[in-house]
Image: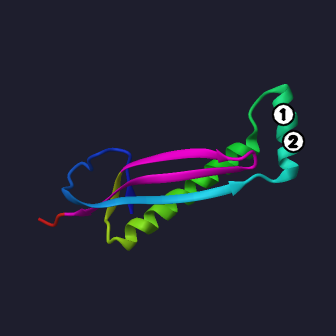
Amino acid sequence: MLVVTTENIPGKEYTVLGEVFGVTTQSKNVFRNIGAGLKNIVGGEIKYYTKMLEESRQVSVERLRGNAAEMGADAVVMMRFDSSSIGQDMQSVAAYGTAVKYIEE
């Protein structure tokens, strides 16, 4: 299923079905959290957290696609991400957009 961040899909006309979402919440491994705390002292990228967020985005987009498929959508337009921390140990990532159905000509 095509997922785009743009409002229009070149060469396609479609009707809007509605909003779709995909959400995941990940928790940090306590041992990696200690390592991240040490990295915070010296600075630099915390690769474990970067990897966790990349995986969270992938999971949220797959769930978004599943939500759109359940609605009978052909594509999702205007896809965006939102993320937030829940306490100190969890990160939530949401993918959201608009499910659309192509108009057959």
For residue 13, which numbered disc appears in the image?
none
Question: Is residue 93 placed above or below 17 in the rendered structure?
Answer: above
Q: Which residue is drawn at 50% across and 60% down?
A: 22
**Residue 35 numbered mark, or none:** 2
Identity, as a three-letter code, of the amino acid under mark 2: Gly
- Give amino acid for label 1: Lys
Question: SS at mark 2?
Answer: helix
Left or right, 58 with reference to 19: right
Distance in Å between CA atoms under marks 2 and 1: 6 Å
45 horizontally vs 101: left or right: right
Per the image, the residue denoted by label 1 is 39
Nearest to the observer: residue 62 or residue 25:
25
When asked about the image quadrant of residue 6, the answer is: top left
Question: Which image quarter: residue 88?
Answer: top right
Name which residue lies at 72% across and 44% down. Answer: 49
Work out which quarter of the rendered image holds the N terminus and state it: bottom left
Total count of labels: 2
Q: Main secondary structure of the magenta part?
A: strand
Residue 26 image point, x, y percent:
68, 56
Read off the magenta span. 78-102
Check if mark 2's residue and mark 1's residue have beta carbons within 8 Å: yes
Residue 41 in the image: x percent, y percent? Answer: 86, 28
